[in-house]
Amino acid sequence: MKNQTTRLKKFMEKDNKNGELPKKIKVEDEEGLTVSYDKEELDDRFPHLIKELSEKTKSLRINAIDNENQQNNKEELQDSSKLYPTELYNPTAIDFIRRCTKKEEATIILDYLLKRDEITQEDYSKTKNIISQEGGLKRFIDESGGLKRPGYYMRKYYKRDIKNQKINTKKD
């Protein structure tokens, strides 16, 4: 419809030298087929469209898209992901389990990750067997780096910028 409206306006501008709408309005589609409409018929069916086209007050300019600029933005985003530690943007099953305090929580997480195919059946079985043993969850968490308490990422990364340099920590 937008292309037809644009072409309708072009035909009207060609035929319209004195500011009035022509008696017959020509519309051309993508295949080059031209159809003529009676001005009064269009005025009855589309009064607002005819008013806009005759007044020429409302127009929309469409600028081209700069694909090169979009590609540069994508490359910048990919480069910035290299600056952050992997655990921040791609947590593993171990990262999730390190937040658990009960075996049931860890089992639910493992079941969910297996269902979503984020871990293999082999890793699922191995990890579930380790966790199901007496003291297995605590041992697994300790061997994996310790329990991640609430605020873990805030404490670990908040006072550092992207390049791992300390930032100003003065209080206001």
Image (cartoon, rainbow, N blue to C red):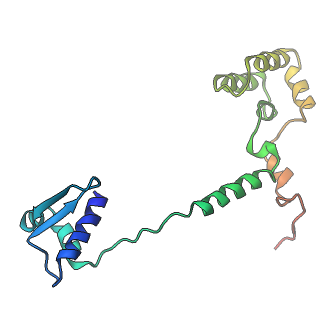
Q: Establish if 142 lies above or below 12.
A: above
Q: Nearer the viewer, residue 94 or 163?
A: 163
Q: Residue at x 15, y 58 (%)?
A: 35
Q: Quadrant of the N terminus?
A: bottom left
- Is 120 rendered above or below residue 18? above
Q: Residue at x 64, y 27 (%)?
A: 116
Q: Is residue 162 left or right of residue 7?
A: right
The relative height of residue 9 versus residue 2 in the rendered view (above or below) is: below
Q: Is residue 65 left or right of residue 27?
A: right
- The residue sitting at the bottom extreme is 18
Q: Nearer the viewer, residue 34 or 87?
A: 34
Image point 83% across, 39% down: which residue?
148
Residue 91, given in percent of the width and then of the height, sits at: 76, 38
Q: Position of residue 72 (x, y in %)?
A: 67, 60
Which residue is located at x 20 percent, y 72 percent? 12
Q: In this rendering, does residue 150 appear at all?
A: no
Relative side of 27 to 168, left or right: left
Comparing 30 with 96, the one in front is: 30
Foreground: 38 or 11?
11
**x, y (%) of residue 80?**
76, 55
- Residue 127 picture location, percent across and down: 81, 20
- The count of marks equals 0
Image quarter of residue 36: bottom left
Q: Is residue 136 visible?
A: yes
Q: Quadrant of the C terminus?
A: bottom right
User: Which image quarter: residue 146?
Assistant: top right
